[in-house]
Image (tube, grey):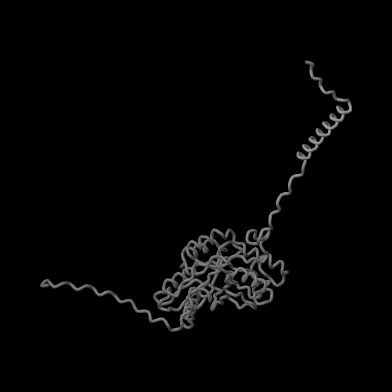
Amino acid sequence: MAAARRPSWSRPAIALLAFWCVVLALACALAAWAVLHRPAPPRPVAAPATAATAPVVPRTAPATAPTPRPALLPPPSTAANPHHWPQVALVLSGIGLARAPSEEAIGSLPAAITLAFSPDAPDLQPLADEAAARGHERLLSLPMEPEGAPRNTEGAHELSLGRSPAANAADLAWALGRFTGYDGLTDAESGQYGEHFATTAGFAPVVAELDRRHLAYISATTPLVAPARTLHADLRLDEADDPAGIDAWLAHLEAMAETHGCALGMVGPPTPLLLDRLRQWSSALPARGVLLLPASAMLPDGGAPCPAPGAAPPVAEPVAPTPPTEASPHD
């Protein structure tokens, strides 16, 4: 039996087959390259944040943001004066200028007496902190040009008509930064009251700053423009060097309170004589039916409205106790 013959391929057929094999290999290579080098799909774009999820926060606080009001002493309630006694308040200015009498005033006077600190005094913060620890209301005395200038002056940083508004603004900022925690400002500065400056248009920027800070202003004079929280003194004593004169002035202040329901006095600076007379006077007030309060209590928002004159019942005289009787031996 004869063996089968293998099919024979012609050279053209073999060349054609090789050509298509090369084409197929190139196509596969191109497909693989395209897969490896195709661009990444685009990332999804986040939806814009709403106001609820992304609040707008300013970079800086507004330049006109109000300064928080310093903490006042708790105002007395009307229940503190159940008998409607006449009310007196007293501001003692010049604290800090003379250290020894200032420390004596802080340590020995009733807490209800308001103390006004001079910004020219050195190292004020410890002294002011001690006054607060003993319950005193603290005021910052604002140095302003007084009557009789330039012969009379309240120091190198006084607010003055002869200076530019920028210079006065700088000195106001200096004074307000002398210590922290004061309950208000006053024009009383150790026996002087800045009348010349406070009664002119130059005082208007001071008013704007005090209102912005919501600070009280306890005034011995009537300014041309007054801050919103202003209280005017009824009586002031500039020369406290005579015992009889001091006693007469205090009696006059007390009589004004009895006539009008309340009265505010200003006195200073502290001296050993003045402090002695203030201690004697204040210790006798309860027996005479008169209530001593911090100055800010008499502000319209101070919590202690003036009682109607004559509303207080008369103070009863103390009755001596009756000695016990001896028991009868027959009992």
Residue 240 in percent (x, y) is at: 53, 72
Q: Is residue 233 above or below residue 7?
A: below
Residue 241 in percent (x, y) is at: 52, 72
Query: Furthest-left residue in view?
Result: 330
Query: Furthest-front residue in view?
Result: 1
Q: Which of 159 and 7 is in front in this view?
A: 7
Name the residue: 79% across, 35% down.
28
Q: Is residue 239 left or right of residue 251?
A: right
Q: In which quarter of the image is residue 224?
A: bottom right
Q: Which of 89 and 61 is in front in this view?
A: 61
Q: In this view, does 38 lie above or below 81?
A: above
- How many numbered marks are there? 0
Name the residue: 54% across, 75% down.
237
Image quarter where the C terminus lies is bottom left
Residue 278 in percent (x, y) is at: 47, 71
Image quarter where the N terminus lies is top right
Q: Nearer the viewer, residue 214 or 63?
A: 63
Name the residue: 63% across, 66% down.
66
Q: In this view, does 303 lie to the left or right of 36?
A: left
Q: Quadrant of residue 324?
A: bottom left
Q: Is residue 77 above or below residue 259?
A: above
Residue 320 in percent (x, y) is at: 29, 75
Q: Nearer the viewer, residue 134 or 271?
A: 134
Query: Furthest-top residue in view?
Result: 1
